[in-house]
Image (cartoon, helix red, strand yellow):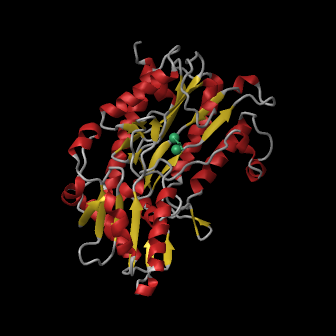
Amino acid sequence: MNKKEFAARRQRLIEIMGPNSIAVLPNATVKNRNRDVDHSYRGDSNFHYLSGFDEPESVIVIVPGRPHGEYILFCRERDLAKEIWDGYRAGQEGAVKKYGADDSYPISDLDDILSGLLEGREQVYYTMGNIPAFDQRMIGWLNHLRNESRQGKHSPYEIIELDHCLNELRLYKSSAEIKAMRKAAEISVDAHIRAMQYTQVGKWEYQVEAEIVHEFMKNDCRSPAYPSIVGGGENGCILHYIENDHKLKNNDLLLIDAGAEYNYYAADITRTFPVNGKFRKCQKALYNIVLDAQKAAIAEVKPGNHWNQPHEAAVRVITQGLIDIGLLKGKLEQLIEKDAYREFYMHRTGHWLGMDVHDVGDYKVGGEWRMLEAGMVLTVEPGLYIRDPKHVDKEWHFIGIRIEDDVLVTKTGHEVLTDRAPKEVDEIEALMAAVEH
Ligand code: GLY
Ligand code: MN
Ligand code: MN
């Protein structure tokens, strides 16, 4: 992403904010792992969206119309001794030169400078509740201004949620964002293919996970976009299974839900395939129901359709499929009406995808499902999860299946960004049969 992209985003925000306002956005805090070891740092998505700046202890301030520059970046000062221990810092000079800030001050000066910037502004765009310690500081600056009102100082009278404004911007992906998402998708597809080629009876789930992470990192993705789910057999029935610590068994399916993060953009793919390379009859029957449901849902992704239409299409195919194989009894419309499928399909068919795997953006607008528009990206991920209900014949037990692709809404319909990951039964079996272990 180049500097122009970030500047254009800030400009769009400035247009929403209006003249007499100010936006304040602190970056994510560092999370401690134990003693003096921290978790690896990942900046706040909104912060990165506006700045491309990824150091902790930084704050973006945007002041529309400010004569000395509208974009101020507070960050750590250069400090050779600290940099020898903890790595590079851009410092104030880097913030201006490399990241396009109009002005930059040391983060240690925030208290001194911010209440002056807030003074005389009418609206503050700031999201309460994300970082409670920062909320307290914001309250302090605002109180300070109120207490100085007799000296003629004006404190802001409106606080507006900044995240909501940014979330709406982030929902529509620019061409640079789509390029990053395509790359995340391609790398993730390769990781799934590699996992299929590696998988064998007797391997451990985490060994398959290692193949996936290797493929991500080898291709410039330093981290998965979320903890990978690698669940064999009954573990595939646990929606958020991340232990990944069981041995893979003959005749089981393996469900892998894994996606790379490339330059802050996520992919999110699920594939389910047989550990020994060949689907059993019941597995194949259920798998094809999910696959048909997914195809029907993807067909509904186009401008002019609303958010819930893909889900409704998936529910219809899944319910009919469950009737056909005898797992549900009754009439299609009535079973849909009473959500009978939910015993076996208990999540929704997708979510927005972007910088966060479960990305931002409202799903309903004015109480109605949101219309799909070009530039939005969503996942389509129906599944079936049959643990061991007593009323279901044992041959169906412990089969968990999900098939998930990432879909871009285009002007004329959609594009499946993750299409290259095999999902037809024949394709998967041929790919796995071609491997010599
Ligand atoms: N990987 C999380 C999800 O599929 O929603
Ligand atoms: Mn997903
Ligand atoms: Mn997923």
Q: What residue is at 60 percent from the left and 21 percent from the top?
A: 252
In the image, 366 versus 161, the foreground residue is: 161
In the image, 103 versus 113, the foreground residue is: 113
Q: What residue is at 45 percent from the left and 50 percent from the top?
A: 356
Query: Is 9 positioned to the left or the right of 337 in the image?
Result: left
Query: Is 206 positioned to the left or the right of 222 in the image?
Result: right
How far across and how far down the image is residue 283, in percent?
A: 62, 27
Q: Is residue 33 above or below residue 373?
A: above
Q: How many marks?
A: 0
Query: Is 125 positioned to the left or the right of 334 in the image?
Result: left
Q: What residue is at 46 percent from the left and 59 percent from the top?
A: 134
In the image, 169 versus 270, the foreground residue is: 169
Name the quarter where the C terminus is drawn.
top left
How far across and how far down the image is residue 217, in percent?
A: 33, 33
How far across and how far down the image is residue 92, in percent?
A: 23, 58
Quarter where residue 63 is shown: bottom left
Q: Is residue 412 visible?
A: no
Q: Is residue 405 above or below residue 306?
A: above
Q: Is residue 110 visible?
A: yes
Quarter where residue 36 is shown: top left
How far across and how far down the image is residue 232, in percent?
A: 57, 24
Query: Is 355 positioned to the left or the right of 280 in the image?
Result: left
